[in-house]
Image: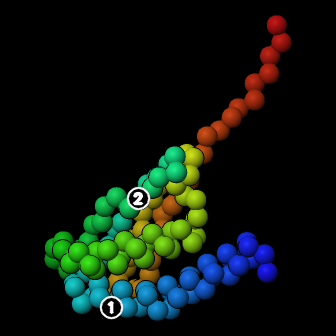
């Protein structure tokens, strides 16, 4: 097995682990903390990227997470983004949000890839 085959095999195994083991536990912890939805913004370019902010909603108010649970949520989102859109922070980069619906058990990424376009315009003098 070549290096890239091994890499893709490891990524697929990690994705399976995140979705079948980490995600259900994380959703349970968020539900226990009173979170209904979470939205995490991220952006990156020039080989650097980060999760920027998280907005959490409960039934009647914003919810505050413990530092550990906030880190778990951010790490989960970061790993899934890396697996699905590896290199999202390179060159012109990308931005978006990770939307978590705790009741539905869904995590949706609204991902935007930044692209520099070149337009061909020949002319003769």
113 horizontally vs 71: left or right: right
Name the image quarter holding residue 69. Answer: bottom left
Q: Nearer the viewer, residue 66 or 37?
A: 66
* Residue density around tag 1, few if under 14, some if 14–19, many if 20 or more, within 10 Å: some
Q: Which residue is mark 1?
A: 28
| Quarter of the rendering occupied by the C terminus | top right
Cβ atoms under marks 1 and 2 closer than 8 Å: no
Determine the residue located farthest toward the left in the rendered image. Answer: 60
Inter-mark Cα distance, 1 to 2: 25 Å
Name the image quarter holding residue 35. Answer: bottom left
Residue 13 numbered mark, or none: none
SS class, disc 1: helix
x and y percent of residue 10 in the render? 63, 81
Point out the frontmost of discs 1 and 2: 2
* Residue density around tag 2, few if under 14, some if 14–19, many if 20 or more, within 10 Å: some
Question: Does 95 appear above or below 26?
Answer: above
Task: Report the residue at 58% width, 65% height from top.
Answer: 85
| Quarter of the rendering occupied by the N terminus | bottom right
Q: Nearer the viewer, residue 106 or 81?
A: 81
x and y percent of residue 110 in the render? 48, 63
Nearest to N terminus: mark 1 or mark 2:
1
Question: Does 52 appear above or below 120?
Answer: below
Task: Report the residue at 20% width, 78% height from top.
Answer: 66
Q: Nearer the viewer, residue 112 or 43?
A: 43
Can see residue 108? no
Q: Which residue is mark 2?
A: 50
Name the image quarter holding residue 70. Answer: bottom left
Task: Report the residue at 80% width, 16% height from top.
Answer: 123
x and y percent of residue 47 in the render? 52, 51
Can see residue 1? yes
Question: Does 10 appear above or below 51?
Answer: below
100 horizontally vs 112: left or right: left
């Amino acid at each position: 097995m070549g290096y890239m085959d091994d890499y893709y095999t490891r990524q697929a195994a990690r994705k399976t682990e995140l979705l079948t083991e980490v995600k259900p536990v994380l959703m349970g912890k968020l539900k226990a903390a009173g979170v209904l939805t979470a939205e995490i913004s991220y952006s990156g370019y020039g080989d650097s990227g980060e999760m920027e902010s998280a907005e959490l909603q409960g039934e009647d108010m914003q919810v505050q997470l413990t530092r550990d649970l906030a880190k778990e949520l951010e790490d989960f989102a970061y790993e899934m983004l890396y697996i699905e859109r590896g290199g999202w922070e390179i060159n012109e980069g990308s931005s978006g949000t990770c939307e978590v619906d705790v009741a539905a058990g869904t995590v949706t990424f609204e991902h935007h890839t930044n692209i520099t376009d070149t337009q061909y315009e020949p002319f003769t003098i």
